[in-house]
Image (cartoon, grey):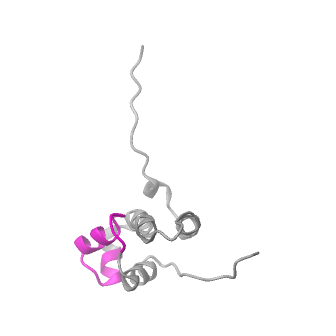
Amino acid sequence: MKKTTTTRYDVAEHLRTPKEMAAYLEACLEEANGNAAFIAKALGDIARAKGMAQVARDAGLSRESLYKALSGERSPGFDTILKVIDALGLKLHAEAHHG
């Protein structure tokens, strides 16, 4: 019997265009249920896809602090979230709940 080798799925490898990145963030925002660390981790996935060093530079943060902020282990400050979203070339938008 042949041994099957598997590799860990890395969503960052599948986020190639700004449109895909925005759709991923949108889906994560819907899934998050108010969990800011979950959103931070999603932003981390997008930042890795785009290049963490470049995103850190554009956000005005050190690479280390960006990794920590987007690890999913804690909730970063909203100012950090906004800087990262801007550095990723994305923007937040709001809409009214339906129902």
Number of on-image labels: 0
| 55 versus 49 height, above or below | below
Instruction: Give the quadrant of residue 67.
Output: bottom left
Q: Position of residue 5 (x, y in %)?
A: 39, 30
Residue 35 image offset from top left, x and y in percent: 46, 68
Give the left or right position of residue 62, taking residue 28 as reference.
left
- Left or right, 12 with respect to 33, comes to left
Range shown magenta:
55-75
Most extreme residue toward the right is 99
Q: Is residue 60 magenta?
A: yes
Q: Residue at x 37, y 73 (%)?
A: 75
Q: Which one is nearer the viewer's eye here, 53 or 25?
A: 25
The residue at the point 33 percent across, 64 percent down is 73
- Pinpoint residue 76: horizontal percent, then vertical percent: 35, 76
Vertical side of 1 occupied by 51: above or below: below
Quarter placement of the N terminus: top left
Q: Quarter of the image holding residue 72?
A: bottom left
Q: In screen coordinates, is 35 left or right of 63?
A: right
Q: Residue at position x 39%, y 83% from top?
A: 83
Q: Which residue lies at the image location 43% right of the left edge and 69% below the top edge?
A: 43
- Is 27 placed above or below 11 here? below
Asked if the stretch drawn in magenta spans residue 68, the answer is yes
Q: Residue 96: name its quadrant.
A: bottom right
Task: State left or right for residue 67 relative to residue 36.
Answer: left
Quadrant of the snapshot with the C terminus: bottom right
